Image: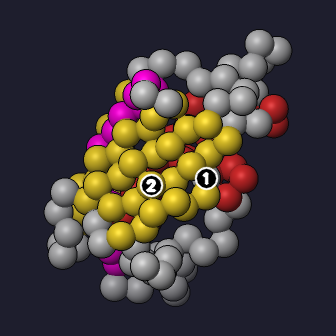
Amino acid sequence: MQIKTHNSIEQSLCGKPITVEEGRSEVCLMCTQNMAADSRGLVHGGFIFGLADYAAMLAVNHPNVVLGSAETRFLKPSRVGDVLVARAQDQTPDERKHEVLVDVLCGEDTVFSGKFICFVTKQHVLENA
């Protein structure tokens, strides 16, 4: 499926799409040293959130999709060297308001889980701004 949104995203920071299908996506992120929050290699949660957010946007896959809100939980720490996979599933396709569930896994372990509320606007949010 053609990717219709977030075409300028820096994939080294937000992940590389593996699968983009109607209402779902999978995105992979390699946790690198520049994501470390400390000398022990703990990955800053903002990168994991960014991965999950990008996966949610791709699950909706509309040029004007934006994030409205998110309820998230960090379940386990991530480290430099981890390979994370975000799996997103749009629970309300064909609606202007989309509820997208996202789990981020490291191997078999779920490290992050969230519900993202996304909106498809009539025009780009920066139009006439």
Q: Mark 1: which amino acid?
A: Gly
- Asked if the magenta segment contains residue 28, the reply would be no
Residue 45, horizontal then vertical, whole percent: 58, 31
Between residues 113 and 71, which one lies in front from this camera angle? 113
Secondary structure predominantly adopted by residues drawn in magenta: strand
Residue 94, horizontal then vertical, whole percent: 18, 75
For this view, does 75 lie left or right of residue 39?
Answer: left
Q: Is residue 107 visible?
A: yes
How crowded pointer 2 is (Cα within 10 Å; few <14, some 14-19, many 20+) is rated as: many
Gap between marks 1 and 2 measured at Cα? 9 Å
Vertical relation: 37 (above or below) 51: above
Residue mark closest to the camera, 1 vs 2: 2
How crowded pointer 1 is (Cα within 10 Å; few <14, some 14-19, many 20+) is rated as: many
- Asked if the magenta segment contains residue 110, the reply would be yes
Q: Mark 2: which amino acid?
A: Glu
Find disc 1 in the rendering and name its residue. Answer: 15
Residue 103, horizontal then vertical, whole percent: 37, 39
Circle 1 SS class: loop
For this view, does 99 lie left or right of residue 24?
Answer: left
Looking at the image, the residue that sits furthest to the top is 40
Query: What kind of colouring is applied to the model shown?
Result: secondary structure
Residue drawn at the location 45% of the way across and 34% of the way down? 105
First-in-chain label (1 vs 2): 1
Q: How many marks?
A: 2
Quadrant of the frame with the C terminus: bottom right
Magenta-drawn segment: 109-121
Residue 63, horizontal then vertical, whole percent: 45, 80
Find disc 2 in the rendering and name its residue. Answer: 26
Quadrant of the frame with the N terminus: bottom left
Between residues 13 and 107, which one lies in front from this camera angle? 107
Circle 2 SS class: strand
Residue drawn at the location 66% of the way across and 23% of the way down? 79
